[in-house]
């Protein structure tokens, strides 16, 4: 099993001294309940760096009071076994008060790109994400930090924060890992009943439908969005937060898809909120990135 450190000062001292000996560190921040998507990030870190460090912390500040913070799955022993199979060297798994001790009161104001889409639905979410990610970067100084395209907007938010605040690291975005039938892997998939699991395929199928139309030359965002909504509805998905085609860099709405774009969906299947996305480009290598 990888070594597990729960104290902030201890991981900071250890990561700092490893870097002083010339080791390149890849950091993979997670909330645990790990699956192949997370492990792909650890493998990428092992490929590019000397050491892969994963963090496991269910961050309370990125959940709204009505969201699933208390029921979010916590399965540390299974997580550690999986991390070992991926070659993870060190795990930082702090208790809540190690990250947010009494008296904690500083927050990061997220970049502009955080205001769109998820920012509309979950107003405090990216403030919590930015704050915890910056703290993790300070506690686990690293050369490269790995994030999944599954959380497309989060990747942009973290990249913009790193750029705007001159953080001395590189953000690497890794492709979405899917189940055999196309459902994007997510820790929240384990909430789905058998029936909901079938319905949840609607997200991938509607992104595929939009991408098929795009590849055949359709460039009107409304037409692509209508197809997405129709496919979601065909799968009995009716609680839709958004199903949009937007500018891939700014997430601003588009009329015509005349520049790099991304189709993004957030919806509820039963009580479980799921998200997925697909980059729209002619370059298929880029589309799966
Ligand atoms: P989470 O534990 O949900 O906070 O996710 C931790 C990291 O794993 C984030 O950078 C996610 O984008 C990434 N991730 C989650 N699911 C997937 C997936 N299916 N494929 C690739 N990366 C993922």
Image (spheres, grey):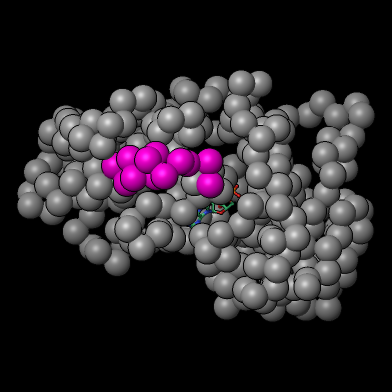
Q: Residue at 53% across / 47% down in the picture?
A: 190
Q: Residue furthest front?
A: 194
Considering the image in quadrants, where does the C terminus appear? bottom left
Q: Residue at 51% across / 60% down in the picture?
A: 37
Is residue 174 within the magenta segment?
Answer: no
Q: Nearer the viewer, residue 16 or 201?
A: 201
Q: Quadrant of residue 252?
A: top left
Q: Quadrant of residue 194?
A: top left
| Secondary structure predominantly adopted by residues drawn in magenta | helix
Residues rendered magenta in the picture: 190-203
Q: Residue at 47% across / 61% down in the picture?
A: 174
Is residue 191 within the magenta segment?
Answer: yes
Q: Nearer the viewer, residue 199 or 91?
A: 199
Q: Nearer the viewer, residue 14 or 180?
A: 180
Q: Position of residue 31 (x, y in %)?
A: 66, 48
Q: Position of residue 14 (x, y in %)?
A: 87, 66
Q: Residue at 83% across / 73% down in the picture?
A: 18
Relative height, residue 207 to residue 246 (above, below) = below
Considering the image in quadrants, where does the N terminus appear? bottom right
**Residue 82 seen in the current view:** yes
């Amino acid at each position: 099993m990888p070594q597990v450190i729960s104290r902030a000062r201890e991981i900071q001292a250890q990561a700092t001294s490893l870097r002083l000996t010339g080791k390149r560190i890849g950091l993979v921040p997670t909330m645990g309940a790990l699956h192949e998507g997370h492990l792909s990030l650890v493998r990428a870190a092992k490929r590019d760096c000397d050491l892969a460090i994963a963090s496991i912390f269910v961050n309370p500040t990125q959940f709204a009071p009505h969201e699933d913070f208390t029921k979010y799955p916590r399965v540390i022993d299974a997580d550690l076994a999986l991390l070992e199979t991926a070659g993870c060297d060190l795990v930082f798994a702090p208790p809540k008060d190690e990250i947010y001790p009494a008296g904690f009161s500083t927050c990061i104001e997220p970049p502009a790109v955080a205001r769109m889409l998820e920012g509309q639905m979950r107003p405090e979410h990216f403030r919590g994400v930015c704050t915890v990610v910056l703290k993790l970067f300070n506690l686990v100084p690293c050369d490269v930090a790995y994030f999944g395209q599954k959380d497309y907007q989060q990747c942009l938010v973290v990249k913009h924060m790193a750029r705007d605040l001159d953080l001395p690291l590189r953000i690497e975005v890794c492709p979405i890992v899917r189940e055999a039938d196309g459902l994007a892997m997510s820790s929240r998939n384990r909430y789905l009943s058998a029936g909901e699991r079938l319905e949840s395929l609607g997200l991938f199928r509607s992104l595929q439908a939009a991408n098929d139309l795009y590849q055949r030359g359709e460039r009107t965002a409304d037409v692509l969005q209508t197809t997405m909504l129709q496919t979601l509805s065909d799968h009995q998905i009716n609680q839709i937060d958004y199903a949009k085609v937007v500018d891939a860099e700014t997430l601003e709405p588009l009329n015509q898809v005349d520049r790099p774009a991304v189709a993004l969906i957030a919806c509820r299947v039963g009580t479980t909120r799921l998200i997925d996305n697909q980059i729209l480009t002619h370059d298929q290598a880029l589309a799966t990135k």
